[in-house]
């Protein structure tokens, strides 16, 4: 019997795409480095397909120093030019510069809130929002949560953090469980029962 997955996970027939859906998407994340990675990748996706970004993920991990915010925050103009010349990532100056900028903004949030994760999970009172979508067309592109989060991140100095990008980020890092109800991962993610502890 075939495993039932979210419609979007079946739209690209690759092992990497299915593995991402099955193992990562929607699992609550409380690690600042991983959160920074997903924030960067979702911002990089703007105007592109997720499969494109997934195919370049290893390049991003290598070139952005494993997404260690302290290291990326130290990048300068020469690093931007080096990254722009490397085809293993999306060569878009604005997106590259925003990643460096966002690393610095993230460090600032860490200084004032202890961790980026603690600040982020406060938006959902430390518990993932459990949705019950039946089909892909039911799932919104933005919500009141993503609007608030986008506004707050922009105020904190982040870039490439529009509401659509932020809702995709919320889905990826488990702030919301947006697996369709007939997807095998919906119940599994819901059963995780994660309550964020800073």
Image (cartoon, grey):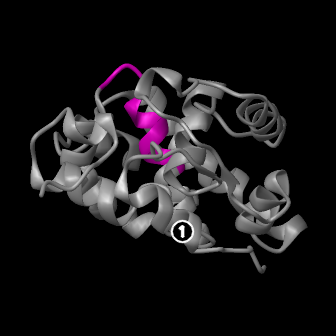
Give the percent coordinates (x, y) of residue 34. 50, 66
Give the residues drawn in magenta, as a range: 39-48
Task: Tell me where residue 7 sits by quadrant.
Answer: top left
**Camera-side residue of 70 and 193:** 193
**Camera-side residue of 137 and 121:** 137
Left or right for 169, reference 80: right
Could you tell me which residue is drawn at 37 percent across and 19 percent down? 47
Left or right for 145, reference 103: right
Could you tell me which residue is drawn at 71 percent across and 28 percent down? 143
Left or right for 45, reference 26: left
The secondary element bearing badge 1 is classed as helix
Q: Tell me if residue 41 is in the magenta stretch.
A: yes
Give the percent coordinates (x, y) of residue 165. 55, 32
Name the residue tied to disc 1.
33
Left or right for 115, reference 142: right
Instruction: Report the number of discs.
Output: 1
Q: Quadrant of the C terminus?
A: bottom right
Q: Tell me if residue 7 is in the magenta stretch.
A: no
**Camera-side residue of 98 and 55:** 55
Compared with 17, 143 (above or below) is above
Crowd around label 1: few <14 · some 14–19 · many ≥20 (10 Å): some
Asked whether residue 70 is in view, the answer is: no
Could you tell me which residue is drawn at 71 percent across and 34 percent down? 146
Quick one: which residue is furthest to the front in this view?
1
Compared with 191, 92 (above or below) is above
Q: Quadrant of the N terminus?
A: bottom left
Magenta stretch prevailing secondary structure = helix
């Amino acid at each position: 019997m075939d495993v039932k997955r979210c419609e979007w996970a079946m739209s690209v027939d690759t092992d990497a795409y299915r593995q991402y859906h099955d193992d990562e998407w929607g699992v609550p994340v409380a690690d600042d480095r991983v959160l920074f990675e997903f924030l960067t990748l979702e911002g990089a996706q703007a105007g592109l397909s997720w499969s494109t970004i997934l195919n370049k993920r290893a390049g991003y991990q290598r070139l952005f120093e494993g997404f260690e915010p302290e290291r990326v925050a130290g990048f300068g103009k020469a690093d931007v030019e080096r990254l722009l010349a490397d085809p293993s990532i999306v060569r878009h100056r604005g997106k590259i510069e925003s990643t460096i900028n966002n690393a610095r903004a993230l460090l600032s949030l860490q200084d004032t809130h202890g961790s980026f994760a603690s600040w982020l999970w406060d938006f959902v009172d430390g518990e993932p929002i459990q949705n019950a979508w039946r089909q892909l067309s039911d799932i919104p592109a933005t919500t009141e949560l993503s609007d608030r989060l986008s506004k707050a991140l922009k105020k904190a100095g982040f870039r490439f953090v529009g509401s659509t990008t932020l809702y995709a980020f919320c889905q990826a890092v488990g702030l919301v469980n947006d697996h369709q109800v007939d997807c095998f991962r919906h119940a599994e993610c819901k059963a995780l029962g994660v309550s964020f502890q800073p």
